Image: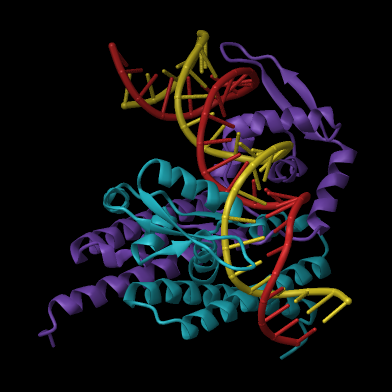
Chain colours: A cyan, B purple, C red, D yellow
DNA sequence: AGGAGCATGTAAGCGGTTACATGATTTA
DNA sequence: TAAATCATGTAACCGCTTACATGCTCCT
């Protein structure tokens, strides 16, 4: 459905759409080429999008897709349909849950790794937010993400501090 | 893999495991019976778990599984293997991203719905945390979740306020 | 009388990722 | 010269959800 959303904003190729996904909403919604190209073909068959082939030198022809009236209706209908619940898959949290079975050092390095990743995600998203011109809603979505990563980071730092305090309970 | 983790804590049936998943880590890791039973069979074939059949009156026999030495090793190996990145699938955020195509009222009711859901999730998790005796790590995992929901709630409330302020810019 | 809870399982299907194949151009 | 970017696509596979099937007991 995100595909139709991006096409609402203008003509795009499958390649473009992948980039947009990655850069803007990759942190909460992801796809691969293997998903996008077949999806576009299907959308075309259903008459929701139209393809324009743009010949290119030295590259495969570019397939530019634009949304049809029918596609717009489908998209608007989607926007009004019941929301799917948000789903989080966190291997990290699963491991924390079972952390009684590993050593404190291993636990600590797990936290450290997740902290590193979180920081990286934060910075990547921050960069995107500053690079692109985005509308109010796009910006809000990204600030949601930013805020989420920041908060997550804080929790991780707190837990690492707690661990270290246990190691050295003598400290004042 | 969560299955092996639960079996580390003692003998469980497939049904038990499903309940535990739902109640404790359901907010970031989910499964259905259709996933658990086949997985248990596979684990048994591989020699990672052992089945004990407990006859019951008026119900199907209960299949109690316990983890084998081999299974423990597999679990410990997993705990030391590279972490999968955390993945979030949020239909809500996707819709926010494309909210320019819906009216303010529709947007507002979307926010309200997500707020309601978030509150419910928070309360459900809070209840679980208070009901069960959990170890340090299990508690921490849940507090992670609690904190996540709380934070999310705040962001939603802020955005709703911002919207309402736009509606009535005259207010002091 | 009906619904929730206990308890196990199968089959169909779907959405999606991973990996592969191709190949010119630009950048480091 | 190697890697990244542009650009499209297919095939295999995988894990998982949904739906179905069964049926007793306890609570309301």
C22 left or right of A73 in image: right
Query: In front: B126, or A8?
Result: A8
Residue B20 sits above or below residue D28 on the image: below
Q: Is residue A16 above or below residue B1?
A: below
The N terminus of chain B, quarter of image? top right
- Placement of the C terminus of chain B among the 4 image quadrants: bottom left
Q: Position of residue A126 (x, y in %)?
A: 52, 82
Which quadrant holds residue B104? bottom left
Q: Residue at x 78, y 33 (%)?
A: B43
Position in image of residue D5 (x %, y %): 63, 74
Q: Residue at x 20, y 63 (%)?
A: B103
**Total of numbered circles in the picture?**
0
Residue positioned 35% across, 44% down in the render: A47
Give whichever of B60, A33 is nearer the camera: A33
Residue toward you, A22 or B40:
A22
Q: Can residue B132 be seen in the rendering of this structure? A: no
């Amino acid at each position: 459905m995100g595909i139709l959303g991006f096409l609402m904003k203008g003509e795009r190729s499958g390649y473009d759409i992948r980039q947009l996904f990655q850069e803007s909403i990759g942190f909460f919604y992801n796809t691969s080429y293997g998903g996008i190209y077949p999806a576009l073909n299907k959308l075309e068959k259903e008459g929701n999008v139209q393809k324009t082939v743009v010949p290119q030198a030295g590259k495969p022809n570019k397939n530019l897709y634009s949304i049809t009236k029918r596609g717009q209706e489908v998209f608007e209908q989607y926007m009004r349909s019941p929301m799917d619940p948000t789903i989080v898959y966190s291997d990290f949290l699963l491991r924390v849950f079972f952390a009684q079975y590993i050593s404190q050092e291993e636990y600590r390095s797990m936290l450290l790794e997740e902290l590193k990743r979180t920081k990286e995600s934060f910075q990547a998203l921050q960069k995107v937010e500053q690079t692109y011109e985005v509308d109010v809603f796009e910006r809000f979505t990204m600030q949601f993400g930013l805020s989420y990563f920041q908060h997550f980071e804080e929790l991780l730092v707190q837990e690492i501090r707690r661990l270290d305090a246990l190691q050295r309970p003598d400290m004042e």
